[in-house]
Every structure is written in C-alpha cells, then in structure tokens.
Amino acid sequence: MSTAQRIDVHHHVVPPVYREALQRVGSDAAGGRHLPDWSPQASLDLMDRNGISTAILSVTTPGVEPWPGQEGRDLARALNEHCAELVRDHPGRFGFWATLTLPDVDGALVEAEHALDELGADGVVLLANSGGTYLGDEAFEPLLAELGRRGAVVFVHPSALPADPVPGIPPFAADFLLDTTRAAAKLAASGTLHRHPDLKVILSHAGGFLPYAVERIAACLEMAGSERSTADLIADLRRCYFDTALSASPYALPGLTAFADPERILFGSDFPYAPADIATTMTERLDASPVIDHAAVDRENAARLLPRHS
C-alpha cells in the first residue's frame, strides 16, 4: 500500500433517506447495480484499509431525477444536509459533492448556491446525461455558466444511456463508459469547456473511452463542422480531470497517462458500488503500476484542486 494519505474523489454515499426514496419508486439499482449496504463506518473501514485520509462523498445515478419538481428539490436538499452533517461529524475524513436537480435547471441553481455557500460542499456531482440531455446542451448552459463563474469543481458521473441496454450486459458494465465519453465530447463540441475555462470537470472511470478515442472524436467533430480545430478540442479535453475508479489496469492506465495532464489524474475507489475487496484490489494494482506518479495521484493533485483538504 502507498504510504501517501490518499484523497478519494469517487466515493459514494447511500443515506437511509435515499435508499427509502428509491425503494418507494421501485428503483433499487444504479445502472443495473443493486444498492449496496453502506454506513459511515463501512466507508471509514475501507478508507483505513487503503490509506485514504479523506473521501469526497457523492450520490450516484439516478440522483434525484426520478422525482421532478419540488419533491426532487426537497430530496436534494436532504441529501446535501446529510452529507454536510457527515463532514461535521468526522472532521478531516469526508467532504462531499453536492447533489443538484438536473434536468430542473432552476432548482439546480438554487441548490448549488445553498450547498456551495452555506454547506461548504467541495463541488457538485452532475450526471453525464439527465433525462437524455447531456452536459454541454444549451438547456444546461445557465447552470454550467454559473459553476464556471464560481470556478467550481464538477464531478461527472455516468448514468444509464438514453437507450435500451444490451440484453445480458448491465449498463454499469459498459454503457457507463460510453455515457461519460458522450458527455465529454458534448462539453467540448458545444464550446462549454472553452467558454468556461475556470470550470473544473472530473470525468469518472478514467474518462470512459475518451483517452483511447480522443483523436478520432476530435477529428470527427472538426469534420462535422466544429468551429474549433482537432487540436483545440483535444486541448479543451485535456483540461479535464480523470479519476482512477475501477480503471487501475495495465490496459487502461497507459492510455490514460498518455493522454491526461499528469497533474489532473485523481484517486478514486467507487466504494461501495465497488465492494471493498474489489476497491482494494484496484488500489493494489494502482500501487503496482509503473506508469503512475503515485504521490501526485494519491494526494497532491487532489490537494491542489481541493485546497481545504491539503
């Protein structure tokens, strides 16, 4: 195990109020992955086992999307208040990405202000697509513009694709990676990353397929009429951050490190949706990798991004 005290930017929380809300609407799975057992102590145990000093907590897909209107706004508020309480109860061990209400943009703006200004959230978590609308769509521009104005951190987590899954292949197995890749491409193609240079975007799971396919994606966007060149689009995408959750393999890491700015690779565990044994195995593989700057990935990069955890 690395001797560094890691900062884990991809670490999920399943508060009782959220579990109960999902069960009421018959949605007890995230992209086909059933809700895992979770408690603050389970997170702390996993953290201690893997040299994680601080975990930035977030609610995963479907967020509050199943509850439109005021019900979704109320649930987002309850989730953020719960996470803020965990941060207070465990000083130095937790931070959190605030849950917002997309595709309800007005509600998201209200909740972002409350969470960032009143609750001390470290940033926000947004799904790659909300109701089939991807980040970078003009419908979401008011929110992204405000987050960019603030220089906020946006943790982008995948969701189910707006399409039927392939029979026998749960969305979290492969579709999640494409969902992240789609969102990244849309953020670049729409000019969102270029218009809002202070926006700090973290792409989950090593960016999905982005590092492997970025040259093709950018070139095809230029061929399709993008006002920005292939080189410009790649430069925009290299400003993103990438976490290592479920991506510490000898196949994925060389591609990630070949593309990503080495100061923008962050440690992620994906606990508890990645069970403790799997999260630990992935951490051990990360520790064994010869292509990673371990001190930077484990802590230094995240400490610069999130200075209150430095």
Image: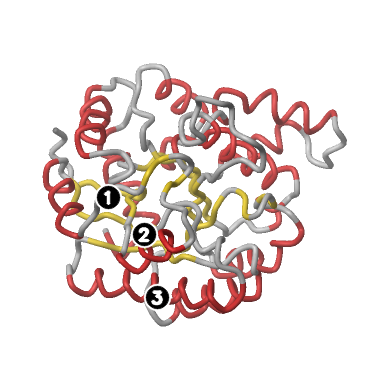
Name which residue lies at 51% across and 50% down: 156
In the rendered structure, which disc, 1 or 2, sits on the residue that comes first in sequence? 1
Q: Name the residue under label 2.
A: 306
Q: Name the residue under label 1.
A: 7
Image location of residue 306, percent across then percent down: 36, 59
**Badge 3 vs badge 1, beta-carbon distance below 8 Å:** no
Q: Mark 3 points at which residue?
A: 78
> Mark 3 to mark 1: distance in Å?
25 Å
| Quarter placement of the N terminus | top left
In the rendered structure, which disc, 3 or 1, sits on the residue that comes first in sequence? 1
Towards the viewer: 66 or 234: 66
According to the image, what is the colour scheme of the structure?
A: secondary structure
Identify the residue at the far right of this view: 225
- Of circles 1 and 2, the one toward us is 1
> Mark 3 to mark 2: distance in Å?
24 Å
Name which residue lies at 39% across and 70% down: 79
- Of circles 3 and 2, the one toward us is 3
Image location of residue 10, percent across then percent down: 36, 48
Q: Mark 2 falls on what kind of element?
A: loop
Q: Label 1: few (<14), some or many (≥20) within 10 Å?
A: many
Amino acid marked by disc 3:
Ala
**Badge 1 vs badge 2, beta-carbon distance below 8 Å:** yes
Name which residue lies at 49% across and 32% down: 170
- Of circles 3 and 1, the one toward us is 3
Amino acid marked by disc 2:
Leu
Q: Seen in the image, is 145 located left or right of residue 251?
A: right
| Quarter placement of the C terminus | bottom left
Q: Label 3: few (<14), some or many (≥20) within 10 Å?
A: some
Image location of residue 290, percent across then percent down: 29, 20
Task: Give residue 229's quadrant in the image.
Answer: top right
Name which residue lies at 36% across and 65% down: 20
Q: Label 2: few (<14), some or many (≥20) within 10 Å?
A: some
